[in-house]
């Protein structure tokens, strides 16, 4: 009898659960973190046995070399820059440009002084920038010399300011190129993150798809287990049902005994469970005897006897209907003696 139950209902939800476990294992392969290679306009990043790696595209590599090389060159100039020396160079250039103009001013003043006959109160004018042979001059010549000296002093101050400004510009340019190179170099890190995010998204999608694929197995296993539990009580109460069908108005004790005997002798005999059916003989009451193969290999009941549908036509009281819808035969019935 236990073999009949096993044949009908299998192992409850365990069989389906096992299928779910196998499907989950197969799906899990796709959810693991896999080696990958991602290529974009920025460059290529990959993950494998050697860990993470990235390489910028040739265009970005060339740009990175240019910016870092330029920054290195400018920082070298900045380090070697001497504002005092540069100020002297600027002053010399500016003073050289002013010398012709100063000479013109001195010549014009000499012409005015000598032309007007004013040669008194002469002072030593050679030191005032009026040129050789100017001799003693009036206070006007002294004023011109002072003005020219003040101009040169202003030029010197401006030269120092320009020198410091040039030094600051060198530093700013070097820092700017270094910053640009740093930003380009940071693209490698962004490239690695981009590849990592892409693989994480793929693995997450595979995991979600696997969960959706396995969910029906869990539901089916639960339903199968509940079905087995709901039908398990059938055979526990079968004695009373068979006893009522077989005993008619007999006493309760004899009914229970008949029911127990029927349970012991009952067996599945529905033609729908059989195949390769061959007639082997016939009982005196006209019932045919057969041998067959069970369609479900898990049914271990004998493979010889009667067919329930034929018994139902002649002796319906010897046939029971299982909750599953299949027909069972009570081989202890008097009309079935010798059927096995």
Image: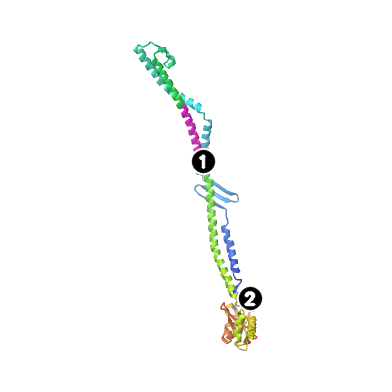
Label 2 crowd (10 A; few <14 / some 14-19 / many >=20): some
Numbered disc 2: secondary structure? helix
Can you say which quadrant of the picture contains the N terminus? bottom right
Query: Residue 245 vs residue 84: left or right?
Result: right
Q: Quadrant of residue 124?
A: top left
Return the disc, 2 or 1, that comes first in the chain's sequence.
2
Vertical arrangement, residue 60 with respect to residue 216, above or below = above
Residue interval drawn in magenta: 159-183
Q: CA distance from mark 2 to mark 1?
A: 79 Å
Can you say which quadrant of the picture contains the C terminus? bottom right
Label 1 crowd (10 A; few <14 / some 14-19 / many >=20): many
Which numbered dot is residue 49?
none
Residue furthest to the left: 116
Q: Position of residue 98 (x, y in %)?
A: 42, 22
Q: Please tell me which residue lies in front, 278 or 48.
A: 48
Please say if the residues under marks 2 and 1 sit with CB atoms less than 8 Å apart. no
Tell me if residue 306 can be seen: no
Numbered disc 1: secondary structure? helix
- How did the renderer colour the structure? rainbow
Q: Position of residue 6 (x, y in %)?
A: 62, 74
Q: Please say whether residue 89 is one of the residues in the magenta stretch.
A: no
Vertical arrangement, residue 32 with respect to residue 191, above or below = below
Query: Taken as a whole, is the magenta stretch helix, strand or loop?
Result: helix
Q: Please tell me which residue lies in front, 295 or 167.
A: 167
Q: Give the residue displayed 51% in from the left and 40% down from the top.
A: 179
Vertical arrangement, residue 141 with respect to residue 202, above or below = above
Which numbered dot is residue 3?
2
Q: Position of residue 281 (x, y in %)?
A: 63, 85
| Residue at numbered disc 1 | 181
Q: Quadrant of residue 115?
A: top left
Q: Please say whether residue 173 is one of the residues in the magenta stretch.
A: yes
């Amino acid at each position: 009898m236990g073999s009949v139950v096993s044949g009908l209902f299998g192992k409850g939800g365990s069989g389906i659960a096992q299928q779910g476990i196998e499907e989950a294992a197969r799906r899990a392969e796709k959810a693991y973190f896999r080696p990958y290679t991602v290529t974009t306009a920025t460059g290529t990043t990959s993950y494998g046995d050697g860990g993470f790696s990235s390489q910028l595209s040739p265009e970005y590599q060339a740009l990175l070399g240019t910016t870092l090389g330029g920054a290195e060159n400018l920082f070298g100039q900045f380090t070697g820059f001497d504002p005092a020396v540069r100020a002297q160079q600027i002053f010399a250039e500016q003073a050289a440009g002013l010398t012709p103009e100063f000479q013109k001013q001195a010549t014009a003043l000499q012409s005015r002084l000598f032309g007007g006959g004013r040669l008194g109160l002469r002072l030593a004018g050679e030191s005032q920038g009026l040129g050789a042979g100017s001799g003693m001059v009036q206070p006007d010549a002294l004023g011109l010399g002072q003005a020219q000296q003040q101009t040169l002093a202003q030029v010197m101050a401006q030269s120092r300011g320009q020198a410091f400004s040039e030094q600051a510009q060198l530093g700013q340019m070097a820092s700017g190129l270094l910053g640009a190179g740093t930003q380009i170099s940071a693209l490698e890190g962004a490239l690695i993150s981009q590849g990592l995010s892409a693989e994480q998204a793929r693995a997450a999608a595979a995991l979600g798809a696997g969960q959706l694929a396995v969910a029906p197995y869990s539901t089916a296993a639960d339903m199968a287990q509940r079905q087995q539990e709901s039908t398990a009580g059938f055979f526990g109460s079968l004695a009373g049902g068979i006893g009522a069908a077989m005993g008619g108005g007999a006493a309760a004790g004899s009914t229970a005994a008949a029911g127990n005997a029927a349970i012991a002798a009952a067996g599945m005999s529905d033609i729908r469970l059989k195949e390769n059916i061959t007639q082997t003989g016939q009982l005196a009451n006209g019932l045919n005897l057969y041998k067959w193969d069970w369609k479900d290999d898990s049914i271990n009941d004998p493979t010889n006897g009667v067919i329930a549908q034929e018994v139902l036509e002649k002796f319906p009281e010897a046939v029971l209907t299982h909750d599953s819808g299949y027909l069972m035969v009570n081989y202890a019935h008097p009309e079935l003696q010798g059927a096995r």
